[in-house]
Amino acid sequence: MKKQILVSLLAGSVILAGCGKKQETAAAAESSPSVASAPVAAIFEVTANDTMKFNVTRLEVKAGQDVKVTMTNMGTLPKAAMGHNWVLLKKGADVKAFTDAAVMAAATDYVPAALADQVIAHTKLLGPKQSEEVSFKAPTEPGEYVFLCSFPAHYLTGMKGVLVVQ
């Protein structure tokens, strides 16, 4: 008995069947769901208030992932007395040296220019009800990266957290 080949169009792809077995053509294989997709951006909303605390102390991302952090100062006290920023430091940065230098860096929103090479990303210093968004690529090296508010004494009172890169 001769083999019969049935050709049909299903969902825009050609399927060839012979002896009861299906074979997909290259066009059908290219549309398969096994194609890797780009990682979705990690989006975080971080708030701070007059109690000198962030609403979150741990953020988790994938290595190399696009990250967007929106920082909002929910407080009511004036910026000069209770401003807040969000500063992400490189892995292994000397946090004490950074925060000590930040005290003297009011002109640069308490991000010391001499230690800028230790910073991955940061917002400006925010007054009450102000927000700012910062976008960056997560580091490619897995580990924990410290984030903090560098306004004088805020880190010491617990205004800090970690970005965990997996």
Image (cartoon, rainbow, N blue to C red):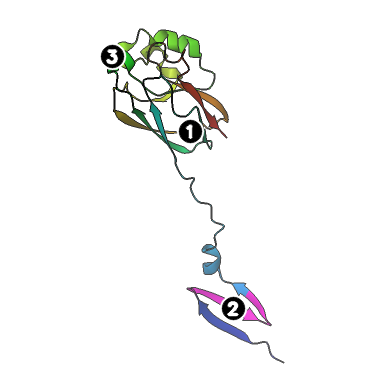
Picture disc at residue 138 = 1
Residue bounds of the magenta highlight: 11-22
Q: Which residue is mark 3?
A: 80
- Mark 1 vs mark 3: give the one in front: 3
User: What residue do we see at 28% from left, 14% from top?
Assistant: 80
Question: Disc 2 or 3, which lies upstream in sequence?
Answer: 2
Main SS class of the magenta portion in the image: strand
Which is closer to the viewer, label 2 or label 3? 3
Residue at position x 45%, y 12% from top? 98
Crowding at dot 3, Cα within 10 Å, few <14 / some 14-19 / many 20+, comes out as few
Amino acid type of the residue that numbered disc 3 sits on in the rendered structure: Ala
- State the image coordinates of residue 8 (x, y, percent, origin top left): 53, 81
Q: Amino acid at mark 2?
A: Leu
Name the residue carrying label 2: 16
Q: Earlier in the sequence, mark 2 or mark 1?
A: 2
Q: Secondary structure at mark 2?
A: strand
Q: CA distance from mark 2 to mark 1?
A: 46 Å
**Mark nearer the N terminus (1 vs 3):** 3
Residue 124, image x and y in percent? 32, 23
Instruction: Give the percent coordinates (x, y) of residue 22.
Output: 63, 76
Q: Is residue 81 above or below residue 54?
A: above
